[in-house]
Image: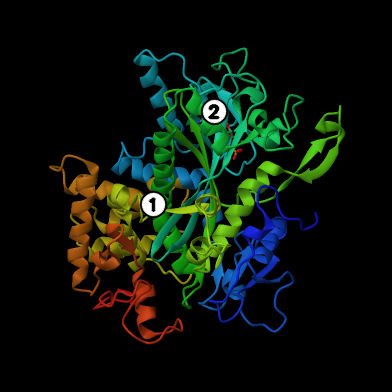
Amino acid sequence: MENRPPSGISNSSFIRSRNTASRRFTIDTSRAKSNQYVVSLCSKKIGIIEYPDGRSDKQPCDVYWHNVVLSDMNKIVTSPQSRVNKFPGMTELAKKISLTHSISSMQKLFPDEYAFYPNSWFLPAHLADFHAFYRKAQALGKTEMWFIVKPDEGAQGTGIYLINSPNQIRNVDQRQLVQEYVADPLLMNDKLKFDFRVYGVIKSINPLSIYVAREGMARFCTEKYEKPDSSNFKNLYAHLTNYSLNKANEAYVHSNTLQDQTRGSKRLLSTVFHQLESRGVKTKRLWHDIKLILVKTTLAMLPEIMLHYEHHFYDSTGPQCFQIMGFDVMIREDGTPILLEVNAAPSLTADHIVPHPGRTLLEGGQRVRSIVDEVIKIPLVRDTLLLVLGLMEEEYQNNSLKGETKSLDDMQTIKQRRKPHLSEIFPTRYGAHSGHLLFLDKAMYIYMQFVQLRSNVNITNAGLKQFVRKCNLIDIIPVVHVDAKVSEINYYFTGEKRTNGNGLPFHAFLMFLFFIAEKKFVLENDLLSKVQRLLSFCDMSLRRYGVRSARLRRAEVDSTIGNVEIYMLPSRMARNRSGTNGRKQNFTDDNNNPNSFAHLPKINERL
Ligand code: ADP
């Protein structure tokens, strides 16, 4: 595709002076693959020098853009000043089963706050639990229940089917996810089911900063929805909203203009919000709830994002990672949003294949620009680049009529045009709503003390035994019983009957913690209080080894947003302190807080 200015965005809105920058920023797009077109276009428009084949002079670039998470990222991105658009380990963490593990840990601790994710069972390990749930629901008179079965590695709707009894699962030994089917989706007048792809950007984890894009996508089914029954449950065109599936249906409505997308199979989120508003849906409330889902889901994934970063950049200061994430959200009839899945590599292509006139896609088609994709993805990538390069303020505060006298109309136009596409939702805006959910970081910090982070992100049996000993928990679980407990938990997590020596992943360690907390603090009312007590107990026990997990996070006061808690990885703070990341050597952190580092133990000082 040639580099034309995208529809809906005038070229002039990009043209800006870079007076403030003493040099021009650089971007390496040699591994951007399918993201290349949009990323190059945006880089050009905001004046970043692009290296499509990488830099031959071996100098680091300011930004590296990859289409997937690369396992050797630390060899490619070596300067701590660089930013890279992927977090190590994120592909795995966003997969259905990993995501379910992260969210279900949070559901156990904060059941009401995480009710936005459907009940899910990981097969084969949770088959008995699934049967038990089914029997209990039947006994309570719920006879019309439907479930959706998804393969773990699946994408684009492949391998998915609906069932209404556990006996219909096709291969119970296969790794897959069974999920309660949300059978009451909100429908438009056309009776088509739809879901939203909402884009979030994790700008950094240290400190944690999350943004949402104000434009997204709505994907429609191509056949009318009816509650599942034995006659229609196989009709995936009515039940699954995936573009890749529905585009093959003759009824798929391709859109060529911003006007005709209002009836298309792929619409702008803002269009559908208008349509919903006219049907009486309170869209402000809906958008608020969706943004909270983005924040809560990221918080659920955060401890492991942090862990993988520490593992991957073990020996180095590490670059600033950021990532665009796609959150798939559907809406219930009563207006409640439900999270379906998280995509760590949402498509950033801005073209699509449309059938030749009078033909179907099965007979081939031609690749053309997709207006809807351009309007969503180009501002998304442009703002993401501006954001990570620290240019957002400059971009949106300057205006293109500098020096001229401005009329009120001009000002109005400027105001409309200069509205950022991305806005921060954490810690600004939703920090106060969700700060208490930043809870598992303490558990993660304790976990990290017992993991050989250089080589592993899992905790071995030996590590767990050390944990039990050092935290004085042998009265709850004698060390000789640890192996048996590990086998039990391991099966629940991996589906493997035998432990393969790889150790337990973090959320499996949490199950171990929950088990101990239940036994040790029986008098506490709920699991959260029990785990809180246990973490404090471990904290106290580890003090004599110099570990202070409470230092992992601290309150930061910002007059514009109030008192917010931010994450700081202890090891990163220690490195900043020694000045190894190229900053001048003083005792301030990324937020210029001079008091962050006193007495922090380095995380790699093993117990
Ligand atoms: P994939 O990664 O294969 O796209 P998803 O989990 O996104 O898998 O599911 C595909 C589609 O199935 C979703 O876009 C949605 O339309 C539908 N779907 C998935 N889970 C549910 C559910 N629990 N309830 C109702 N519909 C669902």
Residue at mark 2: 275
Could you say which quadrant of the image residue 54 lies in?
Answer: bottom right
Q: Amino acid at mark 2?
A: Gln
Q: Which residue is tagged 1?
A: 299
Dot 1 falls on a residue whose secondary structure is helix
In the foreground, 527 or 401: 401
* Nearer to us: label 1 or label 2: 2
Q: Is any atom of residue 496 visible in this view?
A: no
Q: Residue 383's image quarter?
A: bottom right
Give the quadrant of ligand 1.
top right
Give how far apart the Cα atoms at labels 1 and 2 are.
31 Å
The amino acid on which the numbered mark 1 sits, given as a three-letter code, is: Leu
Classify residue 388 as left or right of residue 359.
left
Query: How many neighbours does mark 2 have within 10 angstroms: few (below 14), some (14-19), or many (20 or more)?
Result: some
Query: At x 47% / y 78%, what residue is drawn?
Result: 315
Question: On the image, which quarter does residue 555 sit in?
Answer: bottom left
Q: Tell me, for residue 516, which label it has, or none.
A: none
The percent coordinates of residue 468 (x first, y second) are 26, 60
Residue 86, position as x, y percentages in the image: 56, 61
Would you say 157 lies left or right of 607 here?
A: right
Q: Is mark 2 within 8 Å of ligand 1?
A: no
Q: Position of residue 362 (x, y in %)?
A: 83, 32
The yes-or-no answer for disc 1 within 8 Å of ligand 1 is no
Residue found 64% across the figure and 65% down from its top = 15
Name the colour scheme: rainbow
In this view, 242 is above or below 318: above
Quarter of the image for the C terminus: give it: bottom left
Q: Is residue 70 left or right of residue 574?
A: right
Q: Is residue 328 above or below residue 302?
A: above
120 or 583: nearer the viewer: 583
